[in-house]
Image (tube, rainbow, N blue to C red):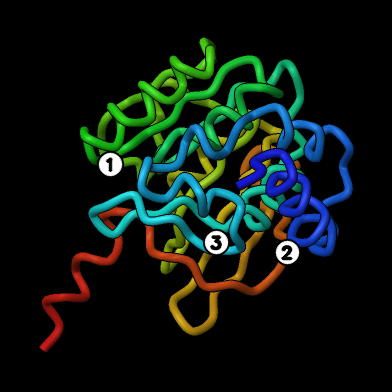
Amino acid sequence: MNIEQARFNMVEQQIRPWEVLDPQVLDLLFVVKREDFAPAAYRNLAFADMEIPLGSGQVMLAPKIEAKLLQELGIKKTDKVLEIGTGSGYMAALLAARAEHVVTVESRPELAEFAKQNLARAGVANVTIEIGNGINGWSARGPYDAIIVSGSLPVLPEALLKQLRVGGRLAVIVGEAPVMEAQLITCTAEGVYNTINLFETVVPALDGMAAPESFVL
């Protein structure tokens, strides 16, 4: 498999058609090696238009969704960013390349360790991995200039919004299958938020969100 050709095809055939045209985002997709963050068994599928299993029901989101959310967040060099759901560490690496610092929260210790190794191997030094349930954010290290949730939420917790600085942006996928909406929410003033619907999609629920449904009789 020609890795560089596969990477180029991913950008040209999946990501550009999704209106991801920010040259900084596109350049980053060539710099941060996605295949190095995929589990070894799925390395050859790193550039496919699909979710990549990470075990325990967790996934790397499809490349076009990651790229679109990254573009919409408009990360700046001075930004302090929160990611909820570390997964393989790939999104954290993308964010870290553009931000001052990234705090990423992962509920599964084994995934946190996998991400830590991937980030270290990639030479990413401005990411802090926290182990815990990040559904209500991570206020201890807040407030943040940008927050991204790497999984869907049935409803948006108020606590997440409160951790945004004025001017801060939140990228999140809200709803339940079959209808979920990717949203960009901007804090325009203290306690005032502007929501833009970006696109419809269906992605797995954030770890810890789906569990209560199994008790419904």
Pointer 1: residues within 10 angstroms few (<14), some, or many (20+)?
some
Q: What amino acid does circle 2 point to?
A: Leu
Residue, x 70% and y 44% (percent of image)?
A: 7
Between 47 and 188, the one nearer to me in the picture: 47
Residue, x 68% and y 54% (percent of image)?
A: 184
**Mark 1: secondary structure:** loop
Residue, x 34% and y 49% (percent of image)?
A: 54
Q: Mark 3 points at which residue?
A: 173
Task: Give the distance between the C-alpha atoms of the residues marked 1 and 3, in whole angstroms.
Answer: 17 Å
Counting residues from the N terminus, which is met first, the one under dot 3 or under dot 2? Answer: 3
Between 208 and 12, the one nearer to me in the picture: 12
Percent coordinates x, y for residue 51 in the rendering: 48, 60
**Mark 3: secondary structure:** strand
Task: Give the distance between the C-alpha atoms of the residues marked 1 and 2, in whole angstroms.
Answer: 26 Å
Quadrant in the picture for the C terminus = bottom left
Q: Mark 2 points at which residue?
A: 198
Q: What amino acid does circle 3 point to?
A: Ile
Q: Is residue 68 left or right of residue 40?
A: right
Q: Mark 1 points at which residue?
A: 133
Q: In this view, does 152 lie to the left or right of 134?
A: right
- Asked whether the residues under the numbered discs 1 and 2 touch, taking CB atoms below 8 Å apart as contact, a structural biologist would say no
